[in-house]
Image: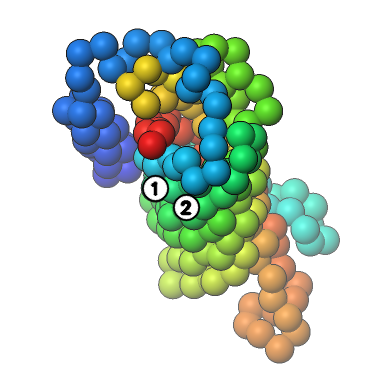
């Protein structure tokens, strides 16, 4: 079993242990309508763990190019505060790793503003839409890059009466690698990385 798979399984087991330790009798019963009413200052904290797939590179004369990379892993810690009943903002610290066919590792770490819109709920489920914008550090082989990252996403969650909600978040990472004629690599090497994250999420509302 690869190091990546071992790390993902260990992280998921740790997350499950933390959640189950906090459980009280009846805590995971379905939430009622009051769960979906939020005031200014209400907060959320979540942990996200799952799979990460480098899809393709775009944005140059070569068109779309395969990354030649396999599924890897991703994780994040996220804090949000509600501004009104439908919108929250906060901060997210996230990272990912994946390897190519030669087992060379790609590492990405980013810090972003965490903006979430809650357009729909069907008790006890809700379906958030997110847009995170931030900066990230990337390393592959002996190459390093620091630049912007944009992450639109959508999720589906089951809300419980104890303040927890659990679900799946699908997030698309857009990572521009912008170079100029005075840099090395040069402007001809400018690319846009496209990545997909599919993660299980445990969220606590307080």
Instruction: Find the residue positioned furthest to the left.
Output: 21
Residue 127: x, y in percent?
60, 24
Instruction: Find the residue positioned furthest to the bottom.
Output: 182
Nearer-the-camera pick, 56 or 18: 18
Instruction: Find the residue positioned furthest to the front.
Output: 39
Check disc 1 and report its element: helix, strand or loop: strand
Residue 93 in sight here:
yes
Query: From the viewer's perspective, is 46 left or right of 25?
Result: right
Q: Residue at x 21, y 33 (%)?
A: 18
Image disc number at residue 92: 2
Quadrant of the image containing the C terminus: top left
Circle nearer the N terminus (2, 1): 1
Q: Against 114, is 16 above or below?
A: above
Residue 200: x, y in percent?
42, 29
Query: From the viewer's perspective, is 206 left or right of 1?
Result: right
Residue 191: x, y in percent?
70, 62
Q: Few, some or many C-alpha atoms within 10 Å of disc 1 (few <14, some 14-19, many ≥20)?
A: some
Q: Residue at x 39, y 18 (%)?
A: 160
Query: From the viewer's perspective, is 98 left or right of 20?
Result: right
Q: Against 135, is 69 above or below?
A: above
Which residue in the structure is indicated by mark 1? 77
Q: CA distance from mark 2 to mark 1?
A: 6 Å
Residue 2 in sight here:
no
Residue 108: x, y in percent?
46, 58
Quadrant of the image containing the N terminus: top left
Q: Few, some or many C-alpha atoms within 10 Å of disc 2 (few <14, some 14-19, many ≥20)?
A: many
Q: Residue at x 62, y 56 (%)?
A: 133
Nearer-the-camera pick, 48 or 5: 48
Q: Quadrant of residue 149?
A: bottom right
Nearer-the-camera pick, 145 or 41: 41
Q: Are marks 2 and 1 in contact (CB under 8 Å)?
A: yes
């Amino acid at each position: 079993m690869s190091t990546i798979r071992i790390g993902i399984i260990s992280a998921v087991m740790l997350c499950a242990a933390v959640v189950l330790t906090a459980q009280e009798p009846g805590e995971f019963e379905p939430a009622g309508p009051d769960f979906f009413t939020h005031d200014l200052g209400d907060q959320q904290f979540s942990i996200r763990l799952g799979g990460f797939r480098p899809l393709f590179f775009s944005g140059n004369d070569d068109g779309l190019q395969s990354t030649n990379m396999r599924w890897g892993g991703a994780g994040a810690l996220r804090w949000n505060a509600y501004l009104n009943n439908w919108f929250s903002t906060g901060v997210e610290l996230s990272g990912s790793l994946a390897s190519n066919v030669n087992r060379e590792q790609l590492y990405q770490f980013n810090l972003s503003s965490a903006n979430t819109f809650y357009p729909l709920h069907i008790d006890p489920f809700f379906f958030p839409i997110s847009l995170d914008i931030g900066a990230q550090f990337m390393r592959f082989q002996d190459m390093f890059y620091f630049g912007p990252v944009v992450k639109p996403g959508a999720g589906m969650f089951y809300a419980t009466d104890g303040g927890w909600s659990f679900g799946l978040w699908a997030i698309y990472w857009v990572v521009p690698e912008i170079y100029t004629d005075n840099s090395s690599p040069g402007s001809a090497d400018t690319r846009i990385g496209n990545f997909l994250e599919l993660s299980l999420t445990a969220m606590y509302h307080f």
